[in-house]
Amino acid sequence: MLTGLEIAERLGTDIIIKPFDIKQLNPNSYDLRLHNELMVYLNSPLDMKKDNETKRITITEKGYLLQPGVLYLARTVEFTETYNLAPQLDGRSSIGRLGLSVHITAGFGDIGFKGFWTLELSCIQPVLIYPLIRICQIYYHQVSSNHHSYISNKYQNNRGIQSSKMFLDFIPSF
């Protein structure tokens, strides 16, 4: 795992974080902030074979109250690119101690990923959230051999919150 100093040294080459603020750099990670927009699915149950309908919610400066039992998709303020390293994302401990989870299974990134990180927010009790809070941290693992960079027509180079694109994995039936 890279140290914070190594993260700073690799900025502009193997690691791109925009915007970057040295105050968000930790001993072995970098804090990413919550954008002011959420997305929720409108229908239940969700269907893996369909592009499920969503709606957008704005988090104002007064905050937004998250409710248990609802999946909220969010994104980071920061756009990241990673080369020759495997990025990983986890919630900050202060966030976890409020009963808020920032990802369900999507905390591991691929070498070559470029984009905003979509977060899967869920809570065990109601919690008020605010835009621009440092909600999660990204850290980087060294890779030990030859590798392929991430190529995807689903999530690469995204410009906002990404709902599930699993429906693209299904081959049409005859």
Image (spheres, rainbow, N blue to C red):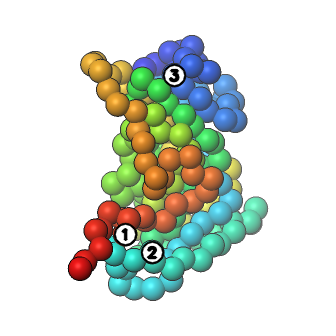
| Cα distance between the residues tagged 3 and 1 | 32 Å
Q: Which element carries disc 1, helix, strand or loop?
A: helix
Residue named by callout 1: 167
Q: Is residue 22 visible?
A: yes
Neighbor class of circle 3 (other Cα within 10 Å; few <14, some 14-19, many 20+) is some
The residue type indicated by label 3 comes to Asp
Quarter of the image holding residue 109?
Answer: top left
The residue type indicated by label 1 comes to Phe
The reply to whether dot 2 and dot 1 touch (C-beta < 8 Å) is yes
Quarter of the image holding residue 66?
Answer: bottom right
The residue type indicated by label 2 comes to Asp
| Quadrant where the C terminus is found in the figure | bottom left
Q: Quick one: which residue is furthest to the left in this view?
A: 174
Q: Position of residue 7 (x, y in %)?
A: 52, 21
Side (left or right) of 91 relative to 132: left
Q: Position of residue 96 (x, y in %)?
A: 43, 52
Quarter of the image holding residue 35?
Answer: bottom right
Q: Residue at x 43, y 65 (%)?
A: 164
Q: Which disc is residue 51 wearing?
A: 2
Side (left or right) of 6 relative to 105: right
Q: Position of residue 9 (x, y in %)?
A: 57, 14
Q: In terms of sequence position, does the residue under pointer 3 or pointer 1 come before the other? A: 3
Q: Quick one: which residue is furthest to the front in this view?
A: 174
Q: Which disc is residue 14 wearing?
A: 3
Pair 3/1: label in front: 1
Q: Residue at x 68, y 59 (%)?
A: 36
